[in-house]
Image: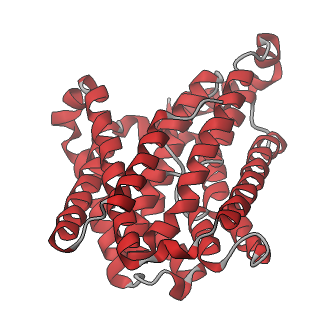
Amino acid sequence: MPIDPYITLLLGTVGVAALLPARGAGADVASGASTAAIAFLFFLYGARLSTREALDGLKHWRLHVTVLACTFVVFPLLGLASRGLVPVFLDDPLYQGLLFCTLVPSTIQSSIAFTSIARGNVPAAICAGSFSSLAGIVLTPLLAAALLGGSAGGFSGDSVLKIVLQLLVPFLAGQFTRRWIGGFVARHRKALGLVDRGSILLVVYTAFSEGMVQGVWGQVSPGRLGGLLVVEAVLLAVMLALTWYGAKGLGFGREDRIAIQFAGSKKSLAAGLPMASVLFGAHASLAVLPLMLFHQMQLMVCAVIAKRRSKDPLPEVTAEDRAAPSRTEAGTATRSG
């Protein structure tokens, strides 16, 4: 299970923030630049998502409702249950960060990639990840207000508005301008992908710089970090099992179960980081630490699962599992005609 090179860059960025944190006017410049970069990132998300693709995805509403329920209901409930692990495995700041991790939306890119490798329903994964990210712009801050309360020190009506302006408005602007720039975005997807990753690195540097200046890292011990890793490993294992076997119990076919497992068991670093910087202020570095660790863990484990799923014998796929999507598509076609 190789380490994602991007995680190495993230850890390197944390190291730079620890040695050379942004202070004073430099911190203001870094904060403004990270805000602009994240807004541009979500603008690109909007420009990439085909409106027709999104509308077609709505036809498979049961799958999307299942993914949303896993992301914004089951995950937060497990996060709340982890409160019982304080103070044995976690201290209170790390617990708050872990709970916040369970509130953020699902990923887009990695869900699509792993679903494709495992020969799952890729269009469903695209729509599920996009819908989850869009819903998270509203649901994550509301859930943070309800479950974290005063722990999310920066939370207020103004912080919700700030998140909407920083994430939702650029996304909608990207959707609106897609007809003119969609082709350019598609042709330069690889180059613009560097913007995605660079934006996240900038947000990480800003958040961890502020944490260093405020001295919040003195609260974390190696033992607590080890306890956090154990808790997150159990959390990921539970969600992977629930999404796979729960989807089977709900009657989904193999391809849909793969999309549900990979979209419903993940948490987005790209969406979570900017939200944490707004909600937690100076304590954002501790708040996003569980999310960063969970992100790497989910990539490593899901890469192994996707490769194993890709080797499933085809006869098992074409018998009963392929029949369910076929009936759904036939029914949709009949209603549309």
Residue found farthest to the front: 19
The structure residue drawn at horizontal position 66% and vertical position 30%, both measured from the top left corner, is 1
The structure residue drawn at horizontal position 27% and vertical position 40%, both measured from the top left corner, is 195
Residue 265, image x and y in percent? 66, 48
> Looking at the image, how many numbered discs can be counted on the residues?
0
Name the one closer to the observer, 274 or 253: 274
User: As drawn, is 147 to the left or to the right of 271?
Assistant: right
Residue 297, image x and y in percent? 64, 45
Q: Residue 85 appears in which quarter of the rendering?
A: bottom right
The structure residue drawn at horizontal position 57% and vertical position 69%, both measured from the top left corner, is 97
Colouring method of the image: secondary structure
User: As drawn, is 41 to the left or to the right of 230?
Assistant: left
Judge whether residue 10 can be spotted in this image.
yes
The structure residue drawn at horizontal position 35% and vertical position 42%, both measured from the top left corner, is 197
User: As drawn, is 244 to the left or to the right of 182?
Assistant: right
Q: Residue 163 appears in which quarter of the rendering?
A: bottom left
Residue found farthest to the bottom: 150
Name the one closer to the observer, 41 or 87: 87
Name the one closer to the observer, 176 or 213: 213
Judge whether residue 334 can be spotted in this image.
no
Looking at the picture, does residue 84 appear above or below residue 293?
A: below
Residue 45, image x and y in percent? 33, 44
Residue 330, image x and y in percent? 63, 26
